[in-house]
Amino acid sequence: MGLEHIPEENRVLIGQSRVKGHGVGADNELGAEIAEEDIDEVQGAIDSIPVHEVDAFLVISGLGGGTGSGGSPVIAKHLKRIYTEPVYGIGVLPGSDEGGIYTLNAARSFQTFVREVDNLLVFDNDAWRKSGESVQGGYDEINEEIVTRFGILFGAGEVEQGGDVAESVVDSSEIINTLAGGGVSTIGYASETVDNNSGGAGSGLLSRFTGDDDELEDTASTTNRITSLVRKAALGRLTLPCEIEGSERALLVTAGPPKYLNRKGIERGRKWLEDQTGSMEVRGGDYPVSNSDQVASVVLLSGVNDVPRIKELQEVAIEAQDNIDEIREESEDNLEELVEDDEDELEPLF
């Protein structure tokens, strides 16, 4: 399901000798072993990419299963050893209703993954699942939320020929500096639909300076909309719910039709983020998208540390680990009781 947009030639199948190319049955230790054994196949695929054009590597994984939670830290460690480009991770936490083994996998993988990447961006399924929603529908919506946030974040600064140029450009170096220092990151998002009938003509950077009333949205309204969206993004549903105060670094990207973007709104939003987080490392910029009918703000909070969900995950994982150990011991005793005769008069063949 998650690979439907990845061309066949860009896919690599690992574990053919151990598990015939199938999954590892939620055994993340086996997943890690297979990734280590087949790392040359992964490297062979990477060798076909012009790495000199790459700003960073991104290792994406669901942390509840076996292959992803076990293999992703192994791949991240390998990439950091080989390349000088930063290696980031996107880790998706399982829902609390998905079962103890998946929570245990996620807790163990989280500890390892965050150590092996330059920064781990976390998405918590629990924060996004709706009651009564089908599994397929739930995953489709979650995937859409992930793509929306990361699409704006990583797309900012990419200018096509003849496209609009941002007033305050957010390029790869801004993202890299925000994620520098390691740790865990979360992303907020908020959007608002606007009337965009201007098409692409006359709505670029120049028109924002010339003051054309037919093309420019009222400055005060534009500024207020941006600052409001920044607040909603930071204080609303984050990919990983947490207290934003104490975040070490932050990055703000506001996207939308050029006439609905202005430097003043972004600066006010950036200043508000500084006040709320207590960080002096808050960067910001805009991402003009002429054919959009929405203005959106994405807030990246890096180095978050007050995250109740992680502590809850670890507590449930410890309980699950204890239960699994008890069940295994009890299972061994029950099997022995079943197989052995009461008087121990029978002897096995060998």
Image: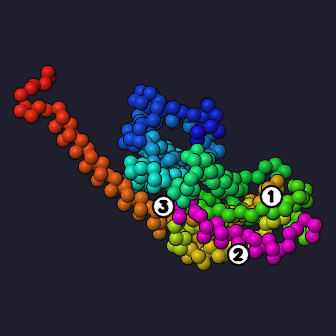
Q: Earlier in the sequence, mark 3 or mark 1?
A: 3
Residue at figure coordinates x 44%, y 61% from the top left? 310
Residues under labels 2 and 3: Cα distance? Answer: 27 Å
Magenta region: which residues?
Answer: 213-241
Inter-mark Cα distance, 2 to 1? 23 Å
Disc 2 marks which residue? Answer: 268
Q: Position of residue 237 (x, y in %)?
A: 59, 64
Q: Which mark is residue 293?
A: 1
Tag 2: amino acid: Arg
Which amino acid, by three-letter code, is at mark 3?
Answer: Gly
Q: Which mark is residue 183?
A: 3
Badge 1 amino acid: Asp
Residue 209 x %, y %? 87, 69
Dot 3, crowdedness within 10 Å: few (<14), some or many (≥20)? some
**45 to the left or right of 323:** right
What kind of colouring is applied to the model shown?
rainbow
Q: Secondary structure at mark 3?
A: loop
Rendered location of residue 190, percent (x, y): 68, 64
Mark found first going from the N terminus, 2 or 1: 2
Residue at 48%, 53% (x, y): give it. 95
Left/right of residue 34 with respect to residue 242 in the rendered view: left
Residue at horizontal 78%, vertical 49%? 160
